[in-house]
Amino acid sequence: MNKVTEPNNKTMLTEETDVRTFIALGSTTDQWQVLSYSAPILPIHAALLHTGKVFFFCGSGNDPAQLNTPYDSVVWDVSKGTFSRQAPPLDSNNQPIDLFCAGHSFNSKGLLMVAGGTLRYDPFYGSLSALMFDPISEKWVKKPSMNNGRWYPTVLTLGSGRLFALSGTDKDGNLNRQPEIYSASFANGWNAFPTTSPFPSYAQLFLLTNGNIFYSGAQMSGNNGVAPSILTLPGTFTQSIAEKVVPGLQDPDFGNQGASVLLPPAQDQKVMIIGGGTGTTATDRVNIVDLKATNPIYVAAKSLNYARMHNSAVLLPDRTVFVCNGSKMSEDTTQSMLPAEIYNPVTNTWTVVAQQNVPRVYHSVALLLPDGRVATAGGNPSRTVDELRLEIYSPGYMSQSRPIIQSAPKRLKYGLQFTIETRQAANIKWVSLIRPMATTHSCDTEQRLVDLPINFRNATSLNVTVTNNRNIAPPGWYMLFINDRNETPSVATWTQLF
């Protein structure tokens, strides 16, 4: 039963929405939970809001019959099991703006910029629209349109707080090769650079410590012959973006619907690419590149236990990488890889953990929740076949005695020393900021784990320092975690870095 309510009139989905179906396979300390209710829309796009709620939207949802109809987005209150509905944004002709296959990232205030979307199907044309979703009002806010359309674009938040958009199919159905940047200070909202190499759709991008941008080689629907590269933004919009190839990636043509992450902590500047495929065949290939090196080069890491494409990768607060979803044969759920895996960067090992119950392929998502669990949703192996069941993974640390943050600042400045109150202060190993995810199509430019060095401690408090580098931790909202010496994380508190 799915009952969806309008904003400010939220009711329970069912009379017993706290009931969960607990199914544990594999480990006795980690488990998957299939929820007793489903998502009211196909969650193609998902973002964790700084209210702790999860935002889903799908536009026309890969269904051409839904183009120009009043489809919705929803905010999921995970703790209550409720959904609230948002009024759809309209264009100048009062037609719904189709946000199917847009790009997105958070701005410095925690609003989600959503750029692009769908003008038409078969062939696809990209929308010029740009909107922001406000987590507090839970409403859409229209922003100035881009210079050209983007369908399957990538959006990345820069250290300045500005938003960088790359690639995607334009309003005429051609590849958009002109990157642009959004800033509220620009007269027209967006300024564009000269054309670049033909970067692929949903090119997976990472902001580096020096302000450069790394394209990992993971993408959607083929790499267009573009190798992993470091992009250097020029000082003016009349100059071209410099591109430097990063060599060494094994099976570079297998990046379709693979995942990639900035390994924790972000200060180490190591990016890992995980799985992916070409055509209908998936790979178990895992490579890592150290981007602090003078001449970075990808090197092989321990392979996945299961080849998979359409996979999702989530940074856990114990500084490991959780991988789930996907299939070894394109969008075939009968070939789905149900056992999840966790990568330990210290030991370079993958461990098979509990098996998820819901197979998820194309248009599936996974994201970290503030309590340390992982929510998974979606799946769309073919048009109008929508997987609406929701499932949550609880890592082994959820069953452990966990440290507790008693108090911490709600706002942080760069370079600041601040105090965290905790009765477990003597036993704390790490303090971390984790940026909330905003994910679609295995792509997430947001998530990163930033180490906060511990300066000193007493029995009840920690003194830690925030990085003074805005490129290591772009401005915005973060989850603050502490981990004990067993590496067990606390539940997060929210703080805004500005």
Image: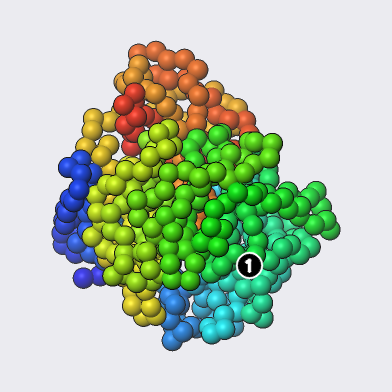
What amino acid is at disc 1? Asn
| Residue 489 picture location, percent across and down | 34, 33
Q: How many other residues sit within 10 Å of disc 1, few (<14), some (14-19) or many (≥20)?
A: few
Q: Is residue 120 above or below residue 371?
A: below
Residue at the limit of the structure toward the top, as seen here: 458
Residue shown at 65% from the left, 49% from the top: 246
SS at mark 1? Answer: loop
**Colour convention:** rainbow
Residue 381: name its quadrant. Answer: bottom left
Mark 1, residue position: 224
* Residue 255 visible in this rendered orientation of the protein: yes
- Give the camera-side residue of 258 and 494: 258
* Residue 142 visible in this rendered orientation of the protein: no
Tell me the quarter of the image containing the C terminus: top right
| Residue 228 picture location, percent across and down | 62, 54
Q: Is residue 177 above or below residue 449?
A: below
Q: How many marks can you see?
A: 1
| Residue 179 picture location, percent across and down | 70, 61
Residue shown at 55% from the left, 29% from the top: 466
Residue shown at 47% from the left, 49% from the top: 286
Q: Is residue 416 above or below residue 426?
A: below
Q: Is residue 303 above or below residue 399?
A: below
Residue shown at 23% from the left, 33% from the top: 400
